[in-house]
Image: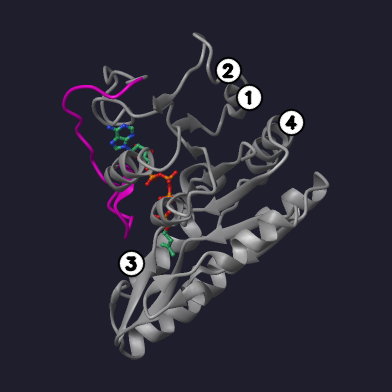
């Protein structure tokens, strides 16, 4: 099996989470550049950031189907496809060929089927998946990018999972709220997670539990600060700054 990475671009790094639909194009371009230099082939997953969480929260998503949640579902799906389009543009500018999928379209009775994205991966393209809203059993659900990463890695096709976010890794508590928070290069001891009030998914808590689950299906799982994407070049060395689970 060739070495293949599943990579998530966190919404906190490719968007400004405080401003609705604000895309960080330069940061995204620098992550794409680092990825193109490090990997020949990978799958890419995009988180919601200010394209996903703002309107989901405003329109009561996830939630039971109603006039309001239906309107919200339309807006969120449209916004997330726009974000995917912007990332797609960034990949194309680097000469990388991607094919995007909304996970809603991959659902079969509420269970995602990744056969189609994997077919594109085998063909040499980058499957581009994005967190999104989807209808299931009279409800509108949100499929988080962190859960997509887990389901993708469960296919057994990947040997590495890399999460880019806006922090240096997992700390013993939120480094944005506590200046003395300690970076955990490897996980140990108690961790405190404070979720951003604007998020409709699980924030760093969900990411942490997804990472632990993913570690059962791949060799190594990393959390790296996407504002310093060149750090992927230090993977495996003493100088590496980030969190690793192996
Ligand atoms: P999105 O969910 O929009 O895709 P993302 O995947 O980049 O974004 P978030 O869910 O926003 O990530 O989580 C990152 C945030 O988690 C950081 O900005 C940080 O403030 C917060 N956080 C809370 N607790 C911790 C912790 N113990 N260690 C590191 N970050 C933490
Ligand atoms: O930001 C959430 O994905 P996440 C996607 O990876 C939406 O949790 C639509 C809010």
Task: Mark 2 or mark 4: name the one nearer the start of the chain.
Answer: 4
Determine crowd level at label 3: few under 14, some 14-19, many 20+ residues with C-alpha closer than 10 A: some
Q: Position of residue 177 (x, y in %)?
A: 27, 31
Mark-to-mark CA distance, 1 and 3: 34 Å
Mark-to-mark CA distance, 4 and 3: 37 Å
The image quadrant that residue 168 belongs to is top left
Which residue is label 4 attached to? Answer: 37
- Judged by depth in the image, the label closer to the viewer, 3 or 2, is 2
Front position in the image: 97 or 169: 97
Task: Mark 1 or mark 3: name the one nearer the start of the chain.
Answer: 3
Can you tell me which quadrant of the image ligand 1 is in?
Answer: top left
Q: Position of residue 175 (x, y in %)?
A: 32, 27
Task: Mark 1 or mark 4: name the one nearer the start of the chain.
Answer: 4
- Judged by depth in the image, the label closer to the viewer, 4 or 3, is 4
Q: Which residues are magenta?
A: 186-204
Q: Is residue 28 left or right of residue 206?
A: right
Front position in the image: 59 or 5: 5
Determine crowd level at label 1: few under 14, some 14-19, many 20+ residues with C-alpha closer than 10 A: some
- Judged by depth in the image, the label closer to the viewer, 1 or 4, is 4
Task: Mark 3 or mark 2: name the one nearer the start of the chain.
Answer: 3
Circle 4: element type: helix
Kindly tell me whether mark 3's CB lies below 8 Å from ligand 2: no
Which residue is label 3 attached to? Answer: 57
Mark-to-mark CA distance, 1 and 2: 8 Å
Q: Position of residue 239 (x, y in %)?
A: 52, 10
Front position in the image: 13 or 188: 188
Q: Which mark is residue 234?
A: 2
Q: Quadrant of the N terminus?
A: top right
Which residue is label 1 attached to? Answer: 230
* Most distant residue in the left direction: 190
């Amino acid at each position: 099996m060739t070495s293949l990475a599943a990579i998530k671009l966190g919404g906190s790094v490719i968007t400004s989470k405080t401003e609705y639909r604000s895309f960080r194009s330069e940061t995204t371009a620098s992550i794409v550049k680092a990825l193109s230099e490090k990997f020949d082939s990978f799958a890419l997953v995009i988180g919601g950031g200010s394209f996903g969480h703002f309107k989901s929260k405003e329109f009561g998503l996830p939630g039971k189907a109603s006039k309001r949640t239906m309107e919200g579902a339309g807006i969120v799906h449209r916004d997330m496809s726009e974000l995917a389009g912007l990332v797609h543009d960034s990949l194309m500018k680097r000469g990388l060929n991607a094919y995007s999928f909304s996970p809603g379209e991959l659902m079969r009775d509420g269970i995602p089927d990744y056969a189609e994205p994997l077919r594109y991966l085998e063909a040499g393209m980058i499957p581009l998946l994005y967190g999104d809203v989807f209808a299931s059993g009279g409800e509108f659900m949100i499929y988080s990018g962190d859960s997509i990463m887990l389901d993708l890695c469960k296919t057994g096709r990947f040997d590495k999972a890399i999460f880019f976010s806006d922090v240096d890794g997992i700390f013993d508590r939120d480094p944005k709220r506590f200046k003395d928070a300690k970076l955990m290069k490897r996980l140990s001891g108690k961790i405190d997670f404070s979720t951003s009030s604007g998020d409709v998914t699980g924030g760093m808590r969900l990411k942490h539990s997804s990472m632990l689950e993913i570690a059962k299906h791949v060799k190594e799982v990393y959390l790296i600060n996407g504002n310093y994407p060149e750090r992927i070049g230090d993977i495996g060395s003493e100088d590496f700054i980030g969190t690793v689970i192996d």
